[in-house]
Each structure stands twice: as C-alpha cells, then as structure tokens.
Amino acid sequence: MILQYALPSLVLGLVIGYFLRRYIAKLKINSAEVAAENILKEAQKDAEAKKREAILETKDQLFKERSNFERETRERRAELQRWEKRLLQKEENLDKRLDVLDKKDQSLSNRERVVDAKESEIREAQEETRRELERISSLTAEEAKNTLIKGMEEEARRDAQLLINNIESDAKATAEKRARNILAHTIQRLASEITSEITVTSVSLPNDEMKGRIIGREGRNIRALETLTGVDVIIDDTPEAVVISSFDPVRREIARISMERLIADGRIHPARIEEVTSKVTKEVNKVIIEEGDKAVFDLSIQGVSQDLVSYIGRLFFRTSYGQNILAHSKEVANIAGMIAAEIGADVGLAKRGGLLHDIGKAVITDGEGSHAVVGADLAKKFGEIHELVNIIESHHMDREPESVEAVIIQASDSISASRPGARRESMDTYIKRLESLEKIAESFEGVEKSFAIQAGREIRVIVNNDRVNDLKAKEVARDIAKRIEKELKYPGRIKVTLIRETRIVEYAK
C-alpha cells in the first residue's frame, strides 16, 4: 500500500519540482535581462555625457588657439609696419645723401677745372720767370744748376775740413792719456807668467859648431834622436839654436831635456842618445805620475784609477792659449767646488768633474771627435760614473747637461779661461780671429761696419737704420751669434752688440 501511494507521489513531486525550477529559472532570466538593459542604458547615458564634455573641451581649445593665432598675427602685422616705416625713412635718407654727393661731385669737378687752370697759369709764369732769369743772368738752367751744386760741394768740403780739424785737435788732446791707459790695461792683463801655445820648442846652443855634432855623420845622430823621441829636429840658419817640433808635448819635452843633456855632456852619438833618451823618458813618466797624484791629493779626490792619474799628469806638459791645462783643470775644480758648496750641489762630484773635464786633451788620437767626447770615453773606460761622464762630454755642449754639476763645470770653465791674464794667443791667431769675427758680421745684409773689441770677447755691429728695423735688428744679432758659434772656435763666450741709430750732426759757426 505504501508503495502504491509513494510512487505516484514521487512522480508528482518530480513533475512539480521540474516545473517549479523552470519557473524560477525563467524569473531569474527575466530579472537578468532587465538588469542588463538598465546597465546598457546607464552606459549610453555616461557615453553621451563624456561625448558632450569632449566636444566642449575641443571647442574651448580651438577658441584659445584661434585667439593666440589672431594675437600673433596682429603683432607680426604691427612689426612689419614698423619695418616698412624704417625702410621708407632709410630710403628717404639715402635719396638725400645722393643729392648731397651729387652736389659735392659737381663742386669738386668745378674745383678741378679751377685748379687745372691755375696750374697752367703757374707753369706759364714759371716758364716766363725762368726765361727772364736766364736773360738777366746770361746762364741757362743747366748752367745755373751746375753752379749751385759746385757751391754746395765747396761748402761741404769746408764743413768736412772743419770737422776733421776738430777731431784731430780732440785726438791730440786725449791721445797721450788714452795711450797710457791702454798700456796700463795691457800690462795688467799680461802680468802673469804664461807662455804662448806653440808646437815647437827652441834649444839654445853654445855655438854654431854644435849643430854639426847634433846632425852627426850623414845625419845619423839627428835621425837617432828623431826616431827615439818621435819629434822633428829643425836645424836652420837661426844662430846658436835648434827647433824641436811635435804635436805631442810630452815627446817634445823628452827631446828637449835629452838634447840639453847631450849638449852639456858633449858626447853625442847614437848609443849615447839612446841611453839619455831612455833615462829622460823614465824621469818624465815619473813626473807625470807625481803631478797626477799631486793634483788628486791637493783636491782630496778619492778612488781615481791609476791609469787615469797618468793621463791627468800628462796635462802638466800641455798648454792651451798659453794656459797650462793641469793648472787650469785644478782651478776649475776649485771654482766648481766653491759654487757647488754655495748652492747645495754635490761638491765632490763638481771637483772631480772640474779636474777631469779636459782629460781628453791628454790623449793623442787620429780619430774624429772633440776632446770632450774623447775625454768622456776615457772616463767611461776607467770606471767613472755616468754623471761624471756627462759632465765631461757636456762642458762644451757636445751633449746636453743632465745635472746641476754639469752646468757648474761649464760656468767654472768659462771663468777660468776668460779671466784677464789666463790665456794669451799668438799674434797671428789673434788677428785672424778678429778678422773672422768682423768678416762674419759684415756678411749680413744691412750691416755697415763691425768692430771686434775687448780682445775678441765682444763685437760691435753697426747697421743701416733705413734697411734694418727693430725686429730685424734682433734677428740679425741672433743670426750673427749662431754663425760665430758654428764657424769659429774660441775660449769663453763672445758678446754680440748690434747698434741701430739715427745720428744727425750739425755745427753752428
């Protein structure tokens, strides 16, 4: 029974539930459609509102842009109007100036015609005057000009003679005083005992018969002496004297001492010559070592190679412009040491460099190179440091100085070589050097005259004032100095003084 009632109830319930669910779903669908329609309407309203806002903003922006454009247009139109007014004013001014220029041009043309007419009148008047003067003086224009020139020449000769007379009077008045000053200055410069630098030594003979004994039978004695000492013995017509010639001062000294001993002994033959020269050579070599050791000891220089000491000693027999090279080297060392002590440089290195700076002059070489380069190679060979080698090779600017001590040696060398009385040249060498200085200076364009003064330490150059201006004067002086450095050899330095002036002299009589 329960099953009979339950089953239909179940089916009925299912049918009712099905229709109920469909009804509820339909209600939900209708409700969703209504909501969607409402949302769509709201969206359309919002879109319309935003559209109206965008249209308003765009119109507002267009209005602003149009206002700006109209304002800028008005400003530019006003600016153009101002420029147009200015151009019109300038055009009016130009027209006025053209009118003025036309009037001036017309005025100048009128004046030119007047001037031309007056020039014609003046030429005619001058020609008339010239004819009248020729008629009155009975002279042509050429003859009158020649007469005037002749009179001016005579007047110039009188003025020149008066000038010469005045100069001669002044010269006579001051000649004696100046001559005394020159003599006193010369005596002061040459007061020290120095000898001329020569390559020959003269040996005095007791009589002319000794010349024959020196020559020997068929010249065997003189050949033996020349062979053993390496010198040339010159026997000429000079009375009671023979000449020993050699570029090596040590050989020349050995030959001189040997010949003097042979002459004093009287026994002159090849065996005796060989014996004496051998003994003298040992003595001279001993003197060389002693002088080298003495120089090193006097200057308190340590660690010098004994081979280098022998080269230092050889400088005792070498001279340069009459100045003993060893004495000069010791003097340079002392001066350099004092300068180095004053400025705080290396005193030991300065004194060592001063002693060795001319060591190259002790070396006899057939190769090329100055004594500075040769001396530097010698110092390097015997273990001297690089700084000292640079001092030696740079003291005559063969190399650039690399230390303050090298510069000190340059200055000390110049001080020792250029002080009054330190050096003396032979007269021929001295005159040739002065002539070379003047010749170099006068080879430049614009130079009128040059004078070597101060014993060749200075050259005065006088240039033409019209051909050489201030800038070119400096250039000429610099070029002369460079040319002298390049072409001449000289101790110390030479001062170039260039004079450019305008001088006008007149005399009131």
Image: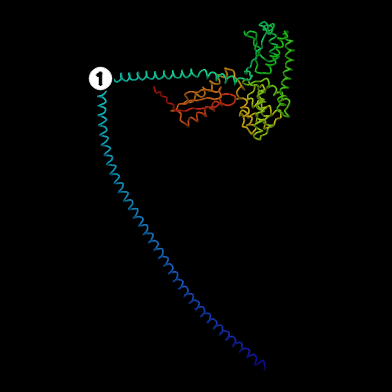
Q: Is residue 445 visible?
A: no
Q: Position of residue 124 (x, y in %)?
A: 25, 27
- Quadrant housing residue 436: top right
Toward the viewer: 206 or 289? 206
Left or right of 354 in this view: 56: left
Q: Residue furthest bottom?
A: 1
Q: Position of residue 291 (x, y in %)?
A: 71, 22
Toward the viewer: 377 or 55? 377
- Residue at 61 percent across and 22 percent down: it is 421
Q: Quadrant of the C terminus?
A: top left
Q: Quadrant of the N terminus?
A: bottom right
Q: Position of residue 220 (x, y in %)?
A: 70, 8
Q: Is residue 254 visible?
A: yes
Toward the viewer: 349 or 506? 506
**Type of amino acid at the residue the image marks with label 1:** Ile
Left or right of 199 in this view: 178: left
Toward the viewer: 267 or 125? 125
User: Which residue is denoted by mark 1 in the rendering?
Assistant: 136
